[in-house]
């Protein structure tokens, strides 16, 4: 028998334990250390690279052991959404460990590539092909990436590094290394950080080092990079996708802990940590030591600063708003990294939230963003996923952006359709799957869906609310954290794991359910603020351009 009091009695202590678990991962400077687990893709490439270079022989057995355990995992029925990742990762591990690949392996790869539908597919095909050629599974193709494509302005920094490195590898595989110009080599070398990495991005670092190795040049840079990779081994011998995404995790945790009603003073160190890492262009990158900023980190950091201490952080807020306004595409949507790249639903929703929180975004900017979301919404009511496997993730953020929007508005209509989409996906046991064709539920997908629906009172019946809450509660460990199969994508469609995210998103959903059951569900959650006088005013200029921002009052400059 489900009762409101009974579920609340379980949620309250579960939230307390989860909050403490998160705080236990916070460092003295306010950073939340989330970590990133080892992954087969980078592990196979790093092992191959170490063998070719004769580097760190004592570590090669550890990495090989990780790859062997990955192959021994007999889960042949992953989510529909993760099949390409699993197939390619198994092929790479088999090639590195056994040196050959049967026809069945290549046929499986071609099938999964044919199923993958995304605007970035051509880049994935080029990356997959060059890796298979490097590992001896395919002969070198005759097509080489044109230099203009590798240098395309619509590519963000690590895609540019990756494409330049792939071009060098292609030329080397064809015996045309002499065609690599000094300017091409310099473009790769100048992007290497002093720690040996390229943007803390382990996959890009592996491919760049393979290119330099085949080219036979830049030996000191290679040694620096190899030492960086050797320092990235995780327990069990795995090599991760990235070193960490602690800036992103700290931003997210700040918002979640605020909604879990952690006292404001507990978040001050995290706010100061984030402010100290704001980049010169006004944005934030995913980790310390990364120069490429993105709308995802920037919008969530901006939302946190606006909600917590808008007066204290007014300079950072102004710069962040200008950064987001400069990113908005002419279609009204927001891309992740650079203006001109494809607009994305979850990024557009987060940008709407942040800009509305700031109080200084021109209204036409928000109107254009909502118009793009209305066009991008699928007939099912959902949106194309970008940075997560779970189909519920974009809908969760769009609902957040539409929270508090009055009936009859475009935003409210989009929200209504998102609610219908999430309700249609709900399984009988109260869970939500990663992909609509999956039979089983997934904890993170359930957290996204429940968090969104709990922000829309009346979207679930009492029994449905209780059942779905119990699904999440069953995922909590004794230490207070939550465990889930990962769903983060990088590069799309390859899956990586930052384990603490399962706890953060589960906390977010349960905090909203608690508020709903305790009579606080009418309070507008994450998506909108209680009305208050704006801290700033703006001077309107042309659409999709940064506004000149001015402070109100006698101290304005």
Image (cartoon, rainbow, N blue to C red):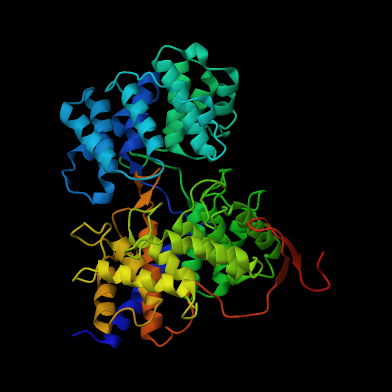
Left or right: residue 414 versus residue 113 is right
x and y percentages locating residue 412 in the rendered image: 45, 75
| Residue 507 vertical position relative to residue 502 in the rendered view, above or below | below
Viewer-nearest residue: 372 or 13:
372
Q: Is residue 237 visible?
A: no
Viewer-nearest residue: 69 or 315:
315
x and y percentages locating residue 321 in the rendered image: 64, 60
Which residue occupies 46% across, 32% down?
A: 205
Q: Quadrant of residue 415?
A: bottom left
Q: Is residue 505 visible?
A: yes
x and y percentages locating residue 333 in the rendered image: 52, 57
| Residue 292 vertical position relative to residue 134 in the rendered view, above or below | below
| Residue 317 vertical position relative to residue 417 in the rendered view, above or below | above
x and y percentages locating residue 317 in the rendered image: 65, 62
Q: How many numbered badges does the structure rendering display?
A: 0
Which residue occupies 48% across, 48% down?
A: 342
Location of the C terminus by quadrant is: bottom right
Left or right: residue 300 versus residue 422 is right
Left or right: residue 380 versus residue 151 is left
Location of the N terminus by quadrant is: bottom left
Q: Quadrant of residue 187?
A: top right
Viewer-nearest residue: 399 or 288:
399
């Amino acid at each position: 028998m489900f009762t409101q009091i009974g579920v609340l009695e379980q949620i309250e202590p579960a939230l307390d334990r989860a909050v403490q678990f998160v705080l236990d991962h916070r460092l003295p400077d306010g950073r939340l250390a989330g970590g990133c687990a080892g992954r087969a893709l980078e592990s196979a490439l790093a092992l191959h690279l170490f063998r070719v270079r004769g580097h760190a022989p004592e570590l090669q057995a550890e990495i090989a052991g990780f790859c062997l355990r990955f192959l021994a995992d007999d889960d042949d029925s992953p989510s529909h959404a993760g099949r390409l990742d699993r197939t390619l990762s198994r092929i790479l591990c088999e090639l590195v460990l056994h040196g050959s690949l049967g026809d069945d392996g290549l046929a499986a790869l071609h099938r999964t590539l044919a199923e993958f539908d995304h605007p970035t597919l051509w880049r994935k095909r080029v990356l997959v092909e060059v890796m298979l050629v490097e590992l001896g599974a395919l002969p070198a193709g005759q097509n080489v990436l044109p230099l203009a494509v590798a240098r395309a302005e619509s590519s963000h920094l690590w895609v540019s590094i990756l494409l330049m490195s792939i071009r060098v590898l292609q030329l080397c595989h064809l015996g045309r290394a002499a065609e690599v110009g000094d300017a091409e080599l310099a473009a790769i070398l100048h992007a290497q950080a002093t720690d040996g990495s390229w943007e803390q991005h382990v996959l890009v670092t592996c491919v760049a080092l393979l290119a330099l190795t085949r080219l036979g040049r830049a030996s000191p840079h290679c040694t620096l990079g190899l030492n960086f990779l050797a320092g990235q081994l995780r327990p069990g011998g795995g090599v991760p996708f990235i070193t960490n995404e602690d800036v992103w995790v700290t931003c997210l945790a700040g918002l979640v802990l605020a909604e879990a009603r952690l006292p404001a003073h507990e978040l001050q160190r995290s706010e100061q940590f984030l402010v100290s890492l704001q980049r010169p262009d006004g944005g934030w990158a995913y980790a310390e030591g990364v120069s490429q900023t993105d709308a995802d980190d920037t919008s969530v950091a901006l939302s946190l600063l606006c909600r917590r201490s808008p007066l204290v952080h007014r300079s950072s807020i102004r710069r962040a708003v200008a950064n987001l306004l400069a990113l908005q595409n002419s279609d009204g949507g927001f891309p992740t990294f650079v203006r001109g790249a494809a607009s994305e639903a979850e990024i557009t929703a987060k940008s709407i939230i942040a800009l509305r929180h700031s109080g200084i975004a021109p209204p036409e900017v928000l109107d254009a963003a909502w118009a793009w979301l209305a066009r991008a919404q699928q007939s099912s009511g959902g949106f194309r996923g970008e940075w997560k496997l779970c189909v519920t993730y974009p809908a969760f953020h769009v609902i957040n952006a539409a929270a508090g929007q009055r009936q009859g508005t475009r935003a409210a209509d989009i929200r209504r359709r998102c609610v219908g989409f999430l309700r249609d996906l709900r399984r009988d046991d109260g869970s939500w799957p990663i992909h609509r064709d999956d039979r089983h539920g997934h904890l993170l997908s359930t957290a996204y869906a429940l968090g969104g629906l709990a922000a829309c009172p009346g979207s679930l019946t009492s029994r449905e609310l209780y059942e779905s809450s119990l699904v999440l509660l069953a995922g909590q460990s004794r230490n207070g954290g939550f465990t889930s199969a990962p769903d983060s994508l990088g590069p799309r469609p390859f899956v990586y794991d930052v384990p603490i995210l399962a706890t953060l998103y589960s906390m977010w959903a349960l905090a909203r359910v608690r508020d709903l059951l305790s009579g606080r569900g009418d309070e507008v959650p994450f998506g909108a603020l209680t009305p208050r006088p704006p801290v700033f005013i703006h001077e309107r200029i042309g659409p999709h351009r940064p506004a000149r921002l001015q402070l109100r009052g006698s101290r304005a400059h």
